[in-house]
């Protein structure tokens, strides 16, 4: 089964990914985290995720980084 898994960073994704891959699923990671601040932390988490995903042959889809839009919506 093809699955889209949202992830905020590499480390918290390891166990769910391991289990899903062992079950035979085809995973794409969705990295959509406008709630992460500052931008340097966002970039650090993204790069960690990209490095890990590349090592595992997993595709990552990145959403736009719009922290002000997120802050306005979250109140």
Image: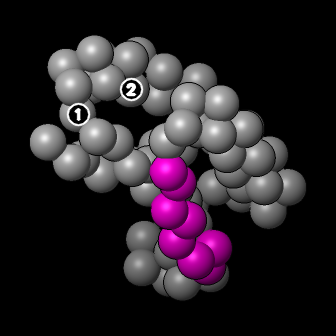
Q: Quadrant of residue 55?
A: top right
Q: In the image, 73: left or right of 57?
A: left
- Residue 41 vs 62, above or below: the answer is above
Q: How is the image coloured?
A: one colour
x 14%, y 42%: residue: 1
x 23%, y 33%: residue: 25
The kind of secondary structure element at disc 2 is helix
x 48%, y 21%: residue: 14
The kind of secondary structure element at disc 1 is loop
| Disc ID at residue 12 | none
Q: Quadrant of residue 75?
A: bottom left
Seen from this angle, which residue lies furthest right? 40
| Disc ID at residue 17 | 2
Where residue 18 sits in the image (x, y, percent)? 38, 17
Magenta-colored stretch includes residue 65: yes
Where residue 47 sits in the image (x, y, percent)? 76, 46
x 19%, y 19%: residue: 23
Magenta residues (range): 59-67
Where residue 9 sits in the image (x, y, percent)? 59, 38
Return the disc, 1 or 2, that comes first in the chain's sequence: 2
CA neighbours of label 2 inside 10 A, class few (<14), some (14 to 19), many (20+): some
The answer to which of 63 and 59 lies nearer the viewer is 59
CA neighbours of label 1 inside 10 A, class few (<14), some (14 to 19), many (20+): few
Q: In the image, 56: left or right of 22?
A: right
**Pointer 1: what residue?**
25
Q: In the rendered image, is residue 70 in sight? A: yes
The answer to which of 11 and 19 lies nearer the viewer is 19
CA gap between label 1 and label 2 equals 9 Å
């Amino acid at each position: 089964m093809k699955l889209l898994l949202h992830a905020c960073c590499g480390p918290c994704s390891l166990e769910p990914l391991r289990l899903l891959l062992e079950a035979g699923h085809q995973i794409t990671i969705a990295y959509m985290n406008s709630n992460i601040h500052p931008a340097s932390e966002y970039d650090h988490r993204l790069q960690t995720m990209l490095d890990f995903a590349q090592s595992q042959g997993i595709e990552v889809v990145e959403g736009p980084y719009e922290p002000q839009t997120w802050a306005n919506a979250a109140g």
